[in-house]
Amino acid sequence: MKLSEKIRTLRKNAGLSQEQLGEKINVSRQAITKWESGDGLPDIYNIVALSNLFSITLDELMAQEKAVADKRFLYESHVEYDIDRLCKFDMNLYTSADLTIRAYDGEKLQLYAGSREIKDLDKLFKVKADDSGRSFDVDIRTSLAKTLCSKSLSLEVLLPQKYIKSIEVAAKTGNMTVRQITAQMIELDTNARELTIDDVHGTVDITGSQDMQITCNTLDGDISVNQTGSVSHLIIPAGVDIRTRCRGLNTRLITADSVTVTPDAPYQIELNGFNSELTIG
């Protein structure tokens, strides 16, 4: 039985809806839907959570997927730093094929790098962290070519939720996922083709210079999109009322018929920039 089928069977046997299962392991209903449909896989932390919740061993849960999962990356690197106070995280994350940033219940900032092609990541991949002030700065420095990293490097950053005040990220990546984070402000400077915001609470400011597909599975704060010469799409949860604002030169903001725009809605979606268009659906 595939992992997707196992999750669905275990959930139904436990008498849980997708939303109820999501609440128990702190993920969104949409994430459960993706896992059960086979459109996505839970990360290792959620796999452990599922194993504990359903009282099933990891080997039993993964079974068919285990061989594939073990071969996801041939080469890996992991670094971590202790955090002991509330702070701003300022991260320059270089270039990668995909990037995931998520919060977790822990004490350390952790950075994982993986690749099927890039050997000796632990030697070539260096992280410079500066925690001398009220911010915790992470700057990735490597001798690897950006073209190689953009095709063959995967990054995952885990942040201790209890110490997050705000987050600022600069990264060039094909796909970016930001999930399970609560912060005053999350600033993303990225040229990701696909950006997914899942179970994120706070104001999100997105800056980019190429067309983006932005999927917002949860909306619990204002969203600002700042772009130049780009045509992007923003998908928001169904049934959520919003306010809109369009600023800049030759910018256009379009809302689909399914989106309700009201002046007193709790959250605002704003487009800023030059020669740009944003469609909200």
Image (spheres, rainbow, N blue to C red):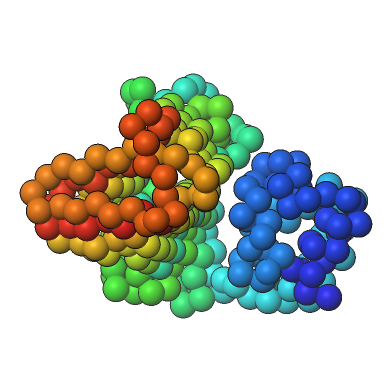
Residue 255 in percent (x, y) is at 33, 53
Tell whether 187 sits left or right of 210.
Answer: right
The quarter holding residue 6 reads: bottom right
Nearer to me, 116 or 260: 260
Q: Is 240 on the left-hand or right-hand side of 224?
A: right
Relative depth, front residue between 261 and 82 = 261
Which residue is farthest left? 249
Whole-percent x, y for residue 193 in the image:
35, 65
- In percent of width and height, residue 251 lies at 15, 52
Q: Residue at x 42, y 30 (%)?
A: 266
> From the viewer's perspective, is residue 36 above or below residue 267?
below
Q: Which residue corresponds to the image point at 68% horizontal and 69% vertical from the top-left? A: 37
Task: Find residue 107 and report its image quarter.
Answer: top right
In the rendered image, residue 239, in percent from the top left (x then y), is placed at: 52, 45
Q: Looking at the picture, does residue 221 appear above or below residue 254? A: above
Q: Report how many numbered discs are placed on residues in the image.
A: 0
**Res. 145 in view:** yes
Q: Nearer the viewer, residue 275 or 259?
A: 259
Q: Is residue 164 above or below residue 270?
A: above
Query: From this viewpoint, is residue 95 visible?
Result: no
Query: Residue at point 71% right, 41% down?
Result: 23
Quarter placement of the N terminus: bottom right
In percent of the image, x 19 and y 53: which residue is there?
Answer: 252
